[in-house]
Image: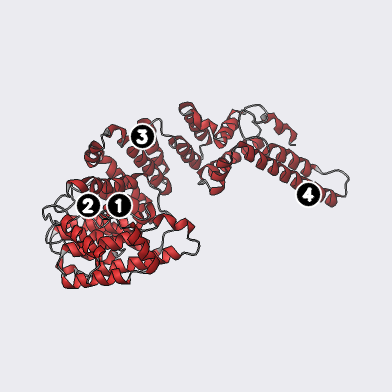
Amino acid sequence: MRSDLVQRWIDLSVAVTREETAAIPLIDENLDLLDVDEELHQVWRYGDSELNADFVRALLESPTNLGVRFAALNAYYHLMEHKRGLEEEDMLGVLAKQRVAFRKKLAFFVGFQPVESCTDLRTIRWEIVNSCAAEDYDRALILCDQLQPLLPSWHVSFARGRLRFLSVHLPLWDDPPSLSSWDLPIGPPPTHNCRFTRMMGPLFTLRRCFTSQELTTGISDDARTHLRKAIAELETASDGNPNIPPECHLMLARSYAAVGQNHEAARCFKRVLAQRDALPRYFEEPLEFLQLPIRDYLPELLSALLHRLVTAHQRAEEMDEAIKAAHEWIDEFPGARDAYPLMARLHEEKGDLKAALSWYRKGEERIPELGDDWKTSLILKLDETSSPVTDRPICRMAKKKATIVLQADWAAPRTNDDRASESRGPLQNETDHGSRRRHDDRCRQRDDELDTRRSGATEPGLAAARRRNWYSRSSSVCSWRTLPSATSCTRLP
């Protein structure tokens, strides 16, 4: 005898899956008239033995009933995602372990239907998403093979390559990933109620391919294997195929960049740029649904694409190509904040310090807020010091080394300490600045004592005087408008 909850779940699931001319709803669907938060809480607290037994019994009685299968998968997906927002308070990891246990049971129900029984586009599309929800990517790849008699061969290769690419990237972009992001646009269209969700998932996935950070370090060997296989599948799909969507070349470029083949990554980014006129049709329908003009959406993506092209050439040590692409980026998007520091870094790597400083100057002129950054301000101040003293070789070398050090610091990512410093406010930061000054004073005193002890003199030596001069300059407020004049270099011998 089934419980009332399971029977209501099945009845509602039969109703939402009845329409055979529409795509099957995804298992993250919230069924109307079914408020199960309290029941899910009780299952988390006391166990799911009764719920599991009822669904297993129902599936054994009606193994081909789509409504029963949808109810079981829908129930265990919502059970797995229940209490998702409480993980920060889960100090012992109890919630995470329970979630893993529910995911295994979801995988059991997903695998309840043999892959060989999925023979139409509607069912295969739905089962691929179900497999990805349970993180059973091997089953999802086998389901892609089931598409071979139904779709052109390039479409099957693209589906397999896309799946491997997303299996590495989506868990890093979203936790948990949206099920609609796994969805393939094949088979009958979704119902009107589900149309928006199914439409926005692939849109957000494509946008993340433009704007998310590169996976250059810290990926596992399994992830690299998936990406290399994704490259092979996507190259097969795009070979000699003029109808391949730009999404394929974009995923290829991201995969090449992640495994360190930056020359190939740049080649694929150029292919996406060559197809830029085809990009609006991927965003036109969802943006029209949201009543957003496409002209306000595409520039950000194109600017990000040019940024990736420049970076790929830079990592491949193709500096001339990188500078050429950076010029195109700045010409098309003169307000791109990251373009000017990156162009300066490219000239710095070529050894052209004068050109690098000129690009910092252009960046501050076109985007005044760039001058508010203390690193840029200091570099610009070093460029302005042109007294006879600073033209001496030692001062020119000091300016160059300071620029290189600051430029490396610019390229370093912001740490949690940086963010914490920004959030503390000026009063606390001023206190921290005072602590650093006291630390510098102690270091200076210790060095003076060491010099005195070594020389046997009563006064610190010349090296100690140089250190005092350095400490006083390094402790100054780092803003070019308040920096001491460069003529302070006259204290050096």
Describe the element under mark 4 as helix, strand or loop: helix
Q: Mark 3 and mark 2: span between their CA atoms?
A: 26 Å
Disc 3 crowd rating (10 Å Cα; few below 14, some 14-19, many 20+) is some
Distance between the alpha carbons at the discs numbered 4 and 1:
57 Å
User: What is the crowding at mark 2: few (fewer than 14 residues within 10 Å), some, or many (at least 20)?
Assistant: many
- Residue 368 pos. (x, y %): 49, 28
Q: Identify the residue at image location x=74%, y=47%.
A: 443
Q: Which residue position holds label 1?
A: 252
The numbered mark at residue 446 is 4
- Which three-letter amino acid code belongs to the residue tagged 1? Leu
Mark 1 and mark 3 residues within 8 Å of each other at the beta carbon: no
Q: Is residue 443 above or below residue 474?
A: below
Q: Is residue 251 visible?
A: yes
Give the alpha-carbon distance from disc 2 to disc 1, as whole Å: 10 Å
The reply to whether dot 2 and dot 1 touch (C-beta < 8 Å) is yes
Q: Secondary structure at mark 2?
A: helix
Q: Secondary structure at mark 1?
A: helix
Disc marking residue 328: 3
Q: Earlier in the sequence, mark 2 or mark 1?
A: 2
The N terminus is located in which quarter? bottom left
Instruction: Measure how far apart labels 1 and 3 are at the Cα level.
Output: 22 Å
Please state which of the two labelled residues, at mark 2 or mark 4, is closer to the viewer.
4
- Left or right of 128 in this view: 477: right
Residue shown at 53% from the left, 42% from the top: 410
On the image, numbered disc 2 is attached to which residue?
A: 238
Three-letter amino acid code at the position of disc 2: Ser
